[in-house]
Image: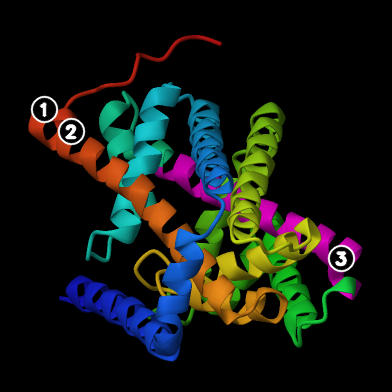
Amino acid sequence: MKKKVFGFLRIAISLGLLSLLFWFMRGKIRDVWKIILECNFAFLWMALIALALDVIMVSSRLATVFKGEKLYISFRRAFQLTCVGYYFNNFMPTAVGGDIIKAHYASKVSAYDKVRSYMSVFMDRFIGLYTILIISAAALIFNGGKLQIPGLRGLTAALITVGAVGFIVVTNKKIAEKVDRFFFKFHAFRLGAGINKLYKIVHDYRNRKMVITKALFLSFAAQCLYFFTVYLFFLALGVKISTGSIFLIMPVVLFVGMIPSLGGLGFREGAIVVLFSPLAGKENSFTVSMLLLASLFLVSIIGGIIYLWWSIKGHAKERLAVQPQDN
């Protein structure tokens, strides 16, 4: 019952916010449609290619982290899992997120236990999260003074601070133990136990420097491609925004999109409109948010087709990955 209620709330929040955004833009819909028809389609195709490369990099990162846990899942399978994750995040009205689905199916195709699969997916998300924080910190240093959007620099600095504190907590054994003891009495939230589990997962990777290094490189490439996709969408509309501004604003958009919802739907689009409007205008910012949403839906549809194929062929019950080999 709790899962159903949570799933319903996610859908209601996302659709409510998206509807509210369309209501605010109700007088500009014709202008938005005109902007799309008159855009530079060469830049649109370039944006789609950049997004496709982004998905490839994210899939490579996932395959790399799986290998770090000695789960020898091919890049092809990791790509499929990534697309299926998008599908569940954006289309499936359930409380089960795409990360859980990826871990579940990874455990099905692996000869190892479920724990390693879930650990791998968590580390994949953990690396991606802190890559965003590093990029936002660099953008704040090099471009923060050039972008005059009220509150943006303070919000970015707050996110970086919270992320840095969180990183220290889950990577330092003594601090993790103290936090565990402090939150032990709050049984309802199980915060201490959760932080302790996170520490153990991260600590388990301390001797896998090559895996972490490669995964970080792929993660940086993936995030840069994702941000570059947004940059190309603006160019397609004839709007020139500096890459520094894109790299400063988009990390905030991504963090806002992490608020519990249906794959960030509503929050992501609203954040793009609010944060980019001072630079590009409401109509252009709304148009870019819709173009990005349509592109993500395209990846989700590919994931849905893969999931349907798995269901038809019964792949969920098969071990599709190759057997582990010695390094």
The reply to whether residue 168 is visible in this rendering is: no
Q: Which residues are magenta?
A: 118-145
Residue nearest the observer in this picture, 17 or 195: 17
Kind of residue sitting beneath label 1: Lys
Magenta stretch prevailing secondary structure:
helix
Element carrying mark 1: helix
Marked residue nearer the N-terminal end (3 or 2)? 3
Disc 3 marks which residue? 143
Q: CA distance from mark 3 to mark 2?
A: 46 Å
Answer with left or right where residue 60 lies relative to residue 302.
Answer: right
Mark 1 Cα shell of 10 Å, populated few (<14), some (14-19), many (≥20): few
Disc 1 marks which residue? 313
Element carrying mark 2: helix
The reply to whether residue 288 is visible in this rendering is: yes
Answer with left or right where residue 15 lies relative to residue 135.
Answer: left
Kind of residue sitting beneath label 2: Trp
Answer with left or right where residue 243 lies relative to residue 36.
Answer: right
